[in-house]
C-alpha cells in the first residue's frame, strides 16, 4: 500500500494498493472519501504527486505507467476534478 499527502491541499491524503484503486481522502471530515480513481488492472506499487499536487502518477505490478492524471482541487466544494492525460 502507498500513502501520500497532497502537497498543497490541507488534510487530503491519497492511498493506493492491491485493489488497483487510488482513493482520495480528507482527514478533516473524519476520513471521508473525496474520490475513487479506478485506473489499474492489478496492484498499484507506486504513487507520486508533483510539487503543486496538480498531477498524479501511479505504476502497476506490470511495470507500466498507467495513470497520469491532472488534478484540480476545488477548495470550496472539497472535490477534485480529474482529467485523464493518456
Image (cartoon, grey):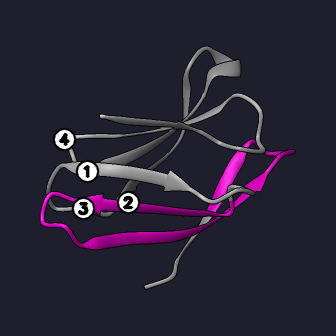
Quadrant including the C terminus: bottom left
Residue found at x 71% / y 20%: 28
* C-beta proximity under 8 Å, tags 4 and 1: yes
The label on residue 40 is 3
**Residue identified by numbered label 2:** 58
Sort mark 3 into few (<14), some (14-19) or many (20+) by Cα contacts within 10 Å.
Answer: many
**Residue identified by numbered label 4:** 18
| Numbered disc 4: secondary structure | loop
Indicate yes or no whether the magenta region holds residue 67: yes
Q: Main secondary structure of the magenta part?
A: strand
Indicate yes or no whether the magenta region holds residue 66: yes
Snapshot quadrant of residue 25: top right
Q: Earlier in the sequence, mark 4 or mark 1?
A: 4
* C-beta proximity under 8 Å, tags 2 and 3: yes
Residue found at x 87% / y 45%: 76
Residue numbers of the magenta segment: 54-81
* C-beta proximity under 8 Å, tags 3 and 1: yes
Sort mark 4 into few (<14), some (14-19) or many (20+) by Cα contacts within 10 Å.
Answer: some
Nearer to me, 48 or 73: 48
Q: CA distance from mark 4 to mark 1?
A: 6 Å
* C-beta proximity under 8 Å, tags 1 and 2: yes
Q: Earlier in the sequence, mark 1 or mark 2?
A: 1
Vertical relation: 51 (above or below) 35? below
Sort mark 2 into few (<14), some (14-19) or many (20+) by Cα contacts within 10 Å.
Answer: many
Q: CA distance from mark 3 to mark 4?
A: 10 Å
**Residue identified by numbered label 1:** 44
| Numbered disc 3: secondary structure | loop
Amino acid at each position: 500500500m502507498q500513502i501520500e499527502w497532497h502537497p498543497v491541499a490541507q488534510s487530503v491524503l491519497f492511498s493506493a494498493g492491491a485493489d488497483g484503486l487510488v482513493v482520495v481522502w480528507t482527514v478533516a471530515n473524519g476520513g471521508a472519501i473525496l474520490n475513487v480513481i479506478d485506473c489499474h488492472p492489478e496492484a498499484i506499487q507506486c504513487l507520486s504527486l508533483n510539487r503543486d499536487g496538480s498531477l498524479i502518477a501511479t505504476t502497476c505490478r506490470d511495470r507500466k505507467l498507467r495513470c497520469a492524471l491532472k488534478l484540480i482541487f476545488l477548495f470550496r466544494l472539497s472535490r477534485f476534478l480529474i482529467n485523464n492525460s493518456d
